[in-house]
Image (cartoon, grey):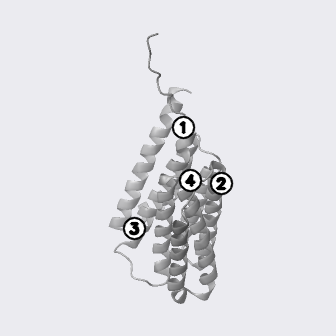
Amino acid sequence: MTAAAGRAPTVLRALFALLTAVHLGALLVDATTVVHLTKPALMPVLAVWALARGGPWPLPVALLCGCGGDVLLQIGGETAFLAGMGCFAAGHLCYLALFARAGRRRTAPWVAAGYGAAWLGTVALLWPGLTPHLRLPVAGYSLLLTFMALAALGAGLWTGLGGALFMLSDTLIAAGLADWPRPPVPQFWIMATYIAAQWLLAAGATRDAVPRPAPERALVSP
């Protein structure tokens, strides 16, 4: 590996952090043009970082699906929203394939039951506030997201936190569709939790792909 190749992940991580800071700052000050320019760049940079770290192919594909969803949600309108949701669903399928390849730790039944109850309760509360065209797609998508979050939890701590934050971010989006009360500057919190979720998923999924130096053996006198 060349020195430049070895530095690539560090440079890409710094670029991702810079884009994140600029994007979130632009949301706070309502700089719409900056928001629209930085949002589509976030996931491609993270995808290249994952590749530079030796991440398996489902990971960058999942992140690029997220990019497609980001772009479509910026367009606005119900058709673009449904298409964007389809992109994110494809990304969740990639994550499921990734975590299936990596193997699973056993998840306690009560944890799985808690995730299922969270899905059912959220859908039940959102259902009356959603338009008829969105009810079944949102319910189906959120069920897939819940499965992904559970699989992420079984794959490790970092990925588990990422899956949980992804659920929180999408719940904030759905709350807007159903006219629920949300925190001030809701787009800031949606993107902050979403970016953190994707970063944790990518970082957790690439940890085992990065070679680590073997521990030095102690020299023992004969």
Mark 1–mark 2 CB contact (< 8 Å): no
The first of marks 4 and 1 along the sequence is 4
Which residue is at the front of the view, 80 or 163? 163
Please name the amino acid that badge 2 sits on. Answer: Ala
In the drawing, what numbered circle is on residue 189? Answer: 3
In the rendering, at what x and y percent does residue 219 appear? 44, 16
Q: Mark 4 packing: few (<14 Cα in 10 Å), some, or many (20+)?
A: many
Distance between mark 2 and mark 3 Cα atoms: 30 Å
- Could you tell me which residue is drawn at 50 percent across and 37 percent down? 8
The first of marks 2 and 4 along the sequence is 2
Badge nearest the viewer, 1 or 2: 2
* Residue at image mark 4: 155
Mark 2–mark 4 CB contact (< 8 Å): no
Badge nearest the viewer, 2 or 3: 2
Mark 1 lies on a secondary structure that is: loop
Distance between mark 4 and mark 1 Cα atoms: 16 Å
Residue 42 in sight from this viewpoint? no
In the drawing, what numbered circle is on residue 100? Answer: 2
In the rendered image, which quarter contains the N terminus? top right
Badge nearest the viewer, 4 or 1: 4
In the rendering, at what x and y percent does residue 60 appear? 60, 50
* Residue at image mark 1: 210
